[in-house]
Amino acid sequence: MRWLLLGTMAVWGANLSVVKLLFESLEPMLVAVLRMAVSALALSAVLVWRRLPWPRLRRSQWLTLAACAVLMIYLNQIFFTEGVARTAAANAALIIALNPLVSALTAALLLGDRLTPSRIGGVVLGFGGVAAVVLHRPGAVLGSGGLGDLLMFGSVLTWVFGGVLVQRLARELDSGLISAVMGVIGSALLALHLGLRPAPVVVHWALVTPLTVALLVVSSLLATAAGALVWNRALVVIGVARTALYAYWVPIFGVLFAVLLLGEPLTVWHGIGLAAVLGGTWLGTRRH
């Protein structure tokens, strides 16, 4: 499970560059709708292929599934997309890196997880590693706080609270079923949001190439669909707080791909950040 999680973080790290390329021809909200729609279709196909019997869902289970979709897909994508557009890249990366801290506190308050010194140490050490990498990237500048930062923090909160609901719901339902239903509901809500907004959808058709379509499909299948399956399964197997610590690896892998593919310089801060994230993950996820 942990190697699968680490692989997913590598895919998410690479996906940062892919999404930036997609934004050159498609507006961010349209990219979010298309990625979630393709992901929902893929997850539904997996569900059919597995031939799982459809359970008789109680009203409370339907409501919880809807709440998960609203939090982890609909609101999360809106907050993230609007937040990134309104704040500095360094601010966004550091706020997202608060995910493990928020997850640890939420799991302690709502799920009764023990907030041990080693777990707190792992969270702090991992955040320090991410900060070392993010703040020493070429052109990294911290902006002043504002609405963009609040929206980014909102995206963190919706992801964490949705994860708590998924962990509780997975005690009764298959995690693959949860991922598929969330994907269908969430993508439908995003499409409705995009269709009802006053501003028209912006598409630079001259920039849409077969490579653009291929990148969109690969991002949807690997980063969104497969990523959702692995993440939701990890929430069940190792819990919200431990799973969240792996999010520290996303910016590390993102910088690694930028060094390999975009020619960014490799500095000693990358090594320090990698060591800190590695140590923080070990401290925060080891069993007591």
Image (tube, rainbow, N blue to C red):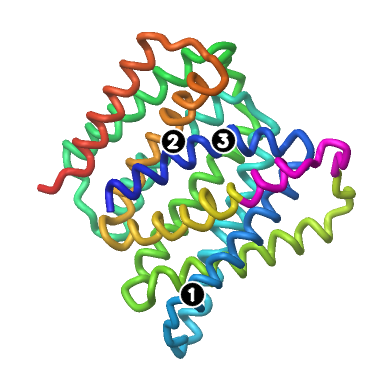
The kind of residue on which mark 1 rests is Leu
Query: Looking at the rendered structure, which numbered label has been put on residue 267?
Result: none
Q: Assess whether mark 3 and mark 2 are in contact (beta carbons under 8 angstroms).
A: yes
Element under label 3? helix
- Residue in front for this viewpoint, 29 or 203: 203
Element under label 2? helix
- Residue in front for this viewpoint, 248 or 206: 206
The residue sitting at 68% across, 34% down in the picture is 21
Element under label 1? helix
Q: Is residue 208 magenta?
A: yes
Residues in magenta, as a range: 203-217
Query: Looking at the rendered structure, which numbered label has been put on residue 47?
Result: 1
Disc 3 crowd rating (10 Å Cα; few below 14, some 14-19, many 20+) is some
The kind of residue on which mark 3 rests is Leu
Name the residue beneath numbered marker 3.
16
Q: Residue at the far bottom: name it.
A: 56
Q: Position of residue 209 (x, y in %)?
A: 78, 41
Quarter of the rendering containing residue 115: top left
The residue sitting at 49% across, 41% down in the picture is 12
Quarter of the rendering containing residue 165: bottom left
Name the residue beneath numbered marker 2.
250
The mark that comes first in sequence, 3 or 1, is 3
Disc 2 crowd rating (10 Å Cα; few below 14, some 14-19, many 20+) is many
Vertical comparison of 107 with 15: above or below: below
The residue sitting at 43% across, 34% down in the picture is 97
Q: Position of residue 153 (x, y in %)?
A: 53, 40
Q: Position of residue 103 (x, y in %)?
A: 36, 47
The mark that comes first in sequence, 2 or 3, is 3
Majority secondary structure of the magenta segment? Answer: helix
